[in-house]
């Protein structure tokens, strides 16, 4: 979340940023409410500190009077200290109320977009920063969408998923399951070669962990929750992996810290109807390999571009047509300061499918997480956090199947042969 100090010092810039997110003047008034509440918090803090200091002084004086045999004077001061303890209790309660209200207000304010983020209302205002210039794959005249290819070659089954769980939970089988495993292995190995440490995190997290990366309270309705245990199924590996260093102070020399993780992801967001969400286009459970970086603030935007180039290399090796889109303020996630989306071409559907988001959150997550570094002079600062999909599997699989179909079967990209053990699905 945004720091109150930053809101005080950069209020005009933050207002400009929130307007990029299409915040109205009425919504922006919350900044004044935050500052007013913080003023009250600071006033109560001073009153409390002064009262505690006075109590400490009187307690020392009581000890001196008792040592001097002035019991009556000491008892009078004791009565005063006792009365002040009730004042302290009331002040502490009031302070906690105001502090909690301030925190609740801060949780409602999204991250401030980077100055390079374009304004816009939605996806139609996003900026294509790298378009596909080469020819698209030539497909047979009777080319099938991936959901039909899955039936033809028995690769995955949605009806079985409905039987076992419900809509949006596919069952992969045979070469479909092997293709999933091959992609996961390929992505992990490529990420490790690029300097990312592999992590295998839990697939359920507690409330503090979900809150630390911004899933709570913003995306509470999209998460599956185990109410009895107070645990949430992760929507992405970003959540547990970024929290590995919650409440930690690392040395400046340790930065950057780079992690990669494969996990299943669980999201309740599927629910719309139509071809654009059919098949693997949108599901409740899917596999994804994530990359996370903990960075020095001065180089986080260079790191963002490095992550973008890394995802590009993965898509090039998979021989998939893709484009890169810079999200406008109105289409960005709540926690992001700047996001690049990757979209791959789906030949049979004749549309672009998003397969990765690569984002810089600056200090928005690290402030919640209290994830900090100590510089050479011993001063402590917040890190920047970044993450990206490298990559999400469902739409990658959809595009691979559709773009590589031939009269003989579905061709598997060469880079995956050593992982799949087969070159064709037929």
Image: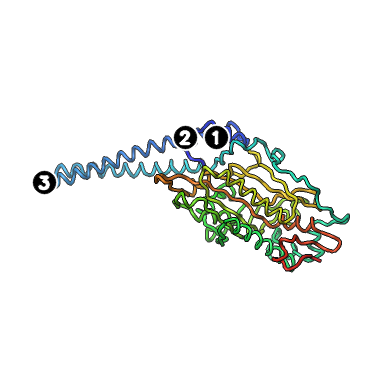
Residue 222 percent across, percent down from the top left: 62, 52
Of the pair 232 and 318, the residue shown nearer to us:
318
Give the CA distance from mark 2 to mark 3.
51 Å
Which residue is disc 3 drawn over? Answer: 69
Q: Residue furthest right?
A: 141
Relative placement, left or right, of 232 versus 159 is left
- Whether residue 308 is situated above or below residue 173 in the rendered picture: above
Counting from the top left corner in percent of width and height, residue 191 is at: 61, 57
Q: What label does residue 14 carry, if any?
A: 1
What residue is shown at x 54% (from left), y 61% (from top)? 228
Q: Is 147 drawn above or below residue 46 in the view shown?
A: below
Say how many tags the image has.
3
Is residue 161 visible in the rendered image? The answer is no
- Which SS class for mark 3? loop
Distance between the alpha carbons at the discs numbered 3 and 1: 62 Å
* Percent x, y of residue 242: 53, 53
Residue indicated by mark 2: 35
282 vs 78, left or right, is right
Q: Quadrant of the C terminus?
A: bottom right
Looking at the rendered structure, the secondary structure element under dot 1 is helix
Quick check: marks 3 and 1 in contact, CB under 8 Å? no
Regarding residue 81, the answer to whether it shows in the image is yes
Tell me which label, 2 or 3, sits earlier in the chain.
2
- The residue drawn where x is 31% and y is 44% is 86
Q: Is residue 29 left or right of residue 375?
A: right
What numbered label is drawn on residue 114? Answer: none
Residue 82 or residue 139, whichever sits in front: 139
Regarding mark 2 in the picture, which secondary structure is present there?
Answer: helix
Q: Earlier in the sequence, mark 3 or mark 1?
A: 1
State the image quarter where residue 80 is shown.
top left
């Amino acid at each position: 979340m945004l720091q109150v100090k930053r809101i005080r010092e950069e209020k005009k810039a933050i207002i400009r940023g929130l307007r990029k997110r299409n915040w109205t003047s009425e919504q922006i008034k919350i900044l004044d409410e935050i500052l007013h509440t913080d003023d009250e918090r600071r006033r109560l803090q001073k009153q409390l500190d002064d009262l505690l200091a006075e109590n400490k002084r009187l307690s020392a004086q009581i000890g001196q009077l008792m040592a001097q045999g002035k019991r009556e004077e000491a008892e009078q001061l004791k009565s005063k200290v006792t009365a002040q303890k009730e004042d302290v209790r009331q002040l502490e309660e009031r302070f906690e109320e105001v502090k909690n209200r301030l925190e609740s207000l801060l949780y409602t304010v999204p991250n401030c977009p980077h100055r390079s983020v374009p304004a816009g209302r939605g996806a139609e205002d996003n900026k294509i920063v790298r378009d596909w210039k080469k020819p698209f794959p030539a497909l047979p005249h009777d080319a099938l969408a991936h959901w039909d290819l899955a039936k033809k070659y028995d690769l995955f089954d949605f009806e079985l998923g409905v039987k076992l769980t419900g809509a949006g939970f596919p069952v992969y089988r045979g070469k479909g399951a092997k293709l999933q495993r091959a992609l996961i292995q390929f992505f992990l190995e490529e990420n490790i070669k690029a300097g990312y440490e592999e992590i295998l995190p839990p697939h359920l997290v507690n409330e503090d962990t979900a809150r630390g990366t911004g899933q709570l309270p913003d995306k509470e309705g999209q998460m599956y929750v185990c109410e009895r245990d107070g645990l949430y199924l992760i929507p992405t590996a970003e959540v547990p992996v970024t929290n590995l260093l919650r409440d930690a102070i690392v040395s400046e020399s340790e930065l950057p810290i780079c992690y990669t993780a494969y996990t299943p992801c669980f999201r309740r967001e599927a629910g719309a109807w139509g071809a654009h969400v059919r098949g693997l286009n949108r599901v409740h459970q899917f596999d994804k390999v994530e990359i996370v970086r903990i960075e020095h603030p001065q180089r986080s935007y260079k790191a963002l571009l490095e992550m973008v180039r890394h995802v590009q290399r993965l898509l090039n090796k998979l021989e998939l047509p893709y484009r890169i889109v810079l999200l406008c303020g109105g289409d960005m996630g709540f926690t992001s300061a700047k996001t690049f989306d990757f979209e791959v071409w789906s030949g049979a559907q004749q549309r672009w499918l998003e397969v990765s988001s690569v984002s810089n959150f600056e200090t928005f997550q690290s402030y919640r997480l209290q994830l900090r570094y100590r510089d050479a002079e011993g001063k402590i600062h917040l890190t920047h956090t970044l993450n990206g999909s490298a990559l999400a599997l469902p739409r990658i699989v959809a595009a691979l199947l559709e773009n590589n179909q031939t009269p003989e079967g579905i061709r598997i990209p060469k880079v995956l042969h050593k992982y799949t053990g087969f070159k064709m699905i037929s």
